Image (spheres, rainbow, N blue to C red):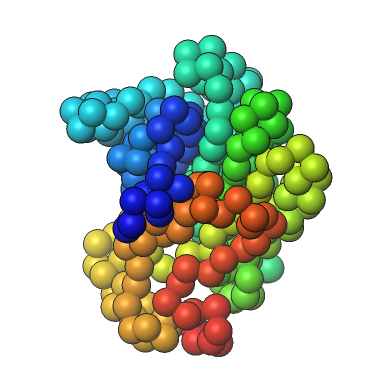
Amino acid sequence: MTTAESKSQSFAGKVAIVTGASSGIGRATAALLAERGAAVALVARDAQRLEQLAREIEAAGGRALAVPTDVTDEAARARLAARVQAELERVDVLVNAAGIIASGRVDDTSLSAWREMFALNVEAVFHLTQLVTPALVASRGAVVNVSSVCGLRAFPGVLSYCSSKAALDQFTGCAALELAPQGVRVNAVNPGVVVSELHRRSGFDDERYAAFLEHSETTHPLGRVGQPREVAELIAFLASDRAAWITGVTIPVDGGRHLTCAR
C-alpha cells in the first residue's frame, strides 16, 4: 500500500462499533480497524472473548472497549449506543456483523425460528443504525452491513436466512438513499462461505462442518472458501475515505459463487 493509500484508509482519531466481534468476520474486522488506528467498541454476547480481543488490541498499541451486549435486546441496544458515545465520544463507523444462520424450508420453518432470524439479522441492524445515526451524521460516517450471497441468490433449505439477508440488502439501499444528503454512507458486503463459527453455532459438529467446507470448494468458482480477513479488508475499504463516493452497494466477496447455481 502506498503512503497516499495508507493515509486514505487510516482510521486514526475515529471510533468504530463492530457487532459480532467475538469471532469470524466481526473479529477480523475489529482487529483490522484497530490496526489502522480506530478506537473500536467490541460488541457480542461473549464477554470473555471480547475482553481477550481487547487485550490483544491494546497490547498492539490500539484502543478497544469491550461492550458485552445481546443486540437482539432493544434496551441493551440503547445502552450500547449511549455507552459508546459517552466513553468514546463519537461514532464514525458502524459494522453490523452479528448474525445467525439456520436450516429450514417453507414447510418446516417455525414462526418462532423465523422471528429469531429476523430479530438478529434485520431488526437489530435497523435499530442500532437508527440509534447511532445522529452521531454518524455529525461525523459524516459510514455503515457497513455484513450480508451474504444468500441475500443475492435463492437457495433451498435456508429459507429464513436467505430472506433475512435479502431484507438486509434492501435496508442497506434504502438507508443509503435516506442518509446520503447528510453525508452518511451505507453499504453491504455479501460473503460466500467463510471459515468461521457461523455454521458451527447452527448445529454443525466437526465432521459435518469439515464435509461442508470440502463441498463448498466445489460451489465457489475460485475453488476454495474464504477467510475472515478477506472480508474484513473489503469492509475496511468501504468504511474508509477511499470509498467516499460509494454508497448503497451490496458487494459479493464470495469466490464467484453469486455467478453460479451450484449448491
From the top left corner, tell me how far across and down residue 50 is, in percent: 33, 30
Residue 202 appears anywhere in the view: no
**Residue furthest toward the left?**
59
From the top left corner, tell me how far across and down residue 4 is, in percent: 40, 52
The vertical placement of 126 against 137, above or below, is below
Task: Report the number of numbered marks.
Answer: 0
- Point 53% across, 47% down: residue: 241
Q: Residue 64 lies in what quarter of the image? A: top left
- Point 49% across, 79% down: residue: 257
Residue 252 appears anywhere in the view: yes
Give whichever of 71, 256 is nearer the camera.
256
Give whichever of 1, 32 is nearer the camera.
1
The vertical placement of 58 against 201, above or below, is above
The vertical placement of 62 against 213, above or below, is above
Q: Residue 183 lies in what quarter of the image? A: top right
Quadrant including the N terminus: bottom left
From the top left corner, tell me how far across and down residue 90 is, in percent: 55, 22
**Residue furthest toward the top?**
86
From the top left corner, tell me how far across and down residue 228 is, in percent: 35, 57
- Point 36% across, 35% down: residue: 37
The vertical placement of 160 against 83, above or below, is below
User: Is 21 left or right of 261, judged from the image as shown?
Assistant: left
Q: Residue 10 lies in what quarter of the image? A: top left
- Point 41% across, 81% down: residue: 220
